[in-house]
Image (spheres, grey):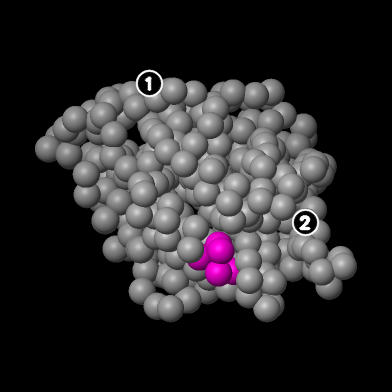
């Protein structure tokens, strides 16, 4: 029997509460102005609720959420984010990594993790420390944080040498584990060079990709671009590592919720993976479920992982 993992990303949970004047400093001021000018109309909470309801009906064995629960990092958004994660499932059933909007200004990420750290808890205990390792069925989930505060109009991410080295150690150890788990890496920013445009990219994507080339992984999940996408990185054994990005789970039908790609690729959706084993190797298949032409949640077809 296969193990099923659902991947949902970039919900940008709203509505955005009206901030106090003293909270509109620096990047928050421009972010709030952008929200009022149009970004709020790109994200639809009814669409998000329909996706979450469908996800729960599919009853996956685990859920991966790759960031951007928040919009401009207001303290009032942290409880909203926790309520959203509770709707997805218990901390045992859902693994979360933060995105750039979750670290919008200094202190935002720390506040969010204080409210939602249970969904980032390592199997060894504690939460809010990255990378973390969670073993679920045949999977070994390695959660990374690329979320850093940046100046206005910049949405870059960074892992840093300590986190990359720790992730390499985890992945190398898992590669020799007698149980041979499927190693699934979770990160918000596209982790490969060229995965996002300058000013929105992962600053140390080349270093991270080189690390994966040394130790390998079975699957890398990310968000950030608001587009369903599949890329590949070379692994140490000659097999390509699938790098899969998800569309925004709250993208309003017909609205451009950010990023690039076709209208179909930007349609609000989540991805459902099935992991099975064949000849000692993990076999992974993926399908999208999202908003169809009729406005209801439906099967959008398979993703070719290669």
Neighbours of disc 1 within 10 Å: few (<14), some (14-19), many (20+): few
Q: Nearer the viewer, mark 2 or mark 1?
A: 2
**How dense is the environment of label 2, judged by Cα within 10 Å: few (below 14), some, or many (20 and up)?**
many
Q: Is residue 234 above or below residue 93?
A: above
The label on residue 284 is 2
Residue 37: give its label: 1
| Earlier-in-chain disc, 2 versus 1 | 1
Residue 300 image point, x, y percent:
79, 41
Magenta range is 170-174
Residue at x-position 59% and y-position 23%: 260
Q: Indicate the position of residue 125 as horizontal and vertical percent values.
A: 40, 78
| Image position, residue 171 (x, y; %) | 55, 62
Query: Residue 106: horizontal and vertical position, in percent?
Result: 22, 44
In the rendered image, the vertical position of residue 15 relative to residue 275, given as above or below: above
The residue positioned 43% from the left and 29% from the top of the image is 200
Front position in the image: 59 or 286: 286
Which label number is shown at residue 72?
none
Q: Is residue 197 visible?
A: yes
Q: Is residue 214 above or below residue 262?
A: below
Quadrant containing the N terminus in the rendered view? bottom right
The reply to whether residue 48 is in sight is: no
In this rendering, is residue 37 above or below 109? above
In the image, farthest residue toward the left: 22
CB contact under 8 Å: marks 2 and 1: no
- Callout 2: helix, strand or loop? strand
Q: Is residue 148 magenta?
A: no
**Image quadrant assignment for residue 37:** top left
Gap in Å between the C-alphas at discs 2 and 1? 41 Å
* Secondary structure type for disc 1: helix
């Amino acid at each position: 029997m296969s193990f099923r993992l659902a991947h949902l990303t970039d919900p940008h949970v709203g509505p955005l509460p009206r901030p106090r004047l003293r909270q509109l400093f620096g990047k928050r001021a421009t972010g709030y102005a952008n929200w009022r000018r149009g970004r709020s109309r790109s994200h639809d909470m009814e669409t998000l609720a329909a996706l979450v309801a469908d996800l729960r009906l599919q009853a996956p064995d685990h859920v991966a959420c790759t960031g951007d629960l928040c919009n401009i990092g207001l303290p009032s958004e942290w409880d909203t984010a926790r309520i959203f994660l509770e709707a997805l499932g218990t901390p045992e059933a859902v693994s979360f990594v933060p995105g750039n909007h979750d670290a919008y200004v200094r202190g935002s990420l720390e506040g969010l993790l204080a409210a939602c750290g249970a969904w980032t808890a390592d199997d060894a205990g504690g939460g809010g420390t990255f990378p973390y390792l969670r073993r679920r069925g045949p999977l070994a989930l390695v959660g990374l944080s690329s979320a850093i505060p940046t100046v206005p109009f910049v949405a870059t991410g960074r892992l840093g040498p300590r986190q990359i080295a720790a992730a390499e150690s985890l992945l190398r150890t898992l590669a020799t584990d007698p149980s041979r788990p499927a190693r699934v890496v979770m990160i918000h920013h596209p982790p490969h060079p060229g995965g996002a445009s300058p000013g929105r990219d992962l600053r140390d994507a080349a270093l991270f990709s080189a690390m994966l080339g040394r130790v390998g992984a079975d699957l890398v999940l990310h968000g950030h671009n608001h587009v369903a996408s599949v890329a590949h990185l070379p692994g140490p054994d000659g097999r390509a590592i699938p790098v899969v990005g998800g569309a925004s789970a709250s993208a309003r039908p017909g609205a451009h919720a950010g990023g690039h790609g076709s209208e179909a690729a930007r349609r609000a959706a989540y991805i459902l993976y099935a992991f099975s084993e064949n000849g000692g190797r993990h076999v992974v298949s993926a399908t999208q479920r999202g908003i169809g032409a009729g406005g209801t949640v439906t099967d959008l077809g398979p993703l070719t992982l290669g």
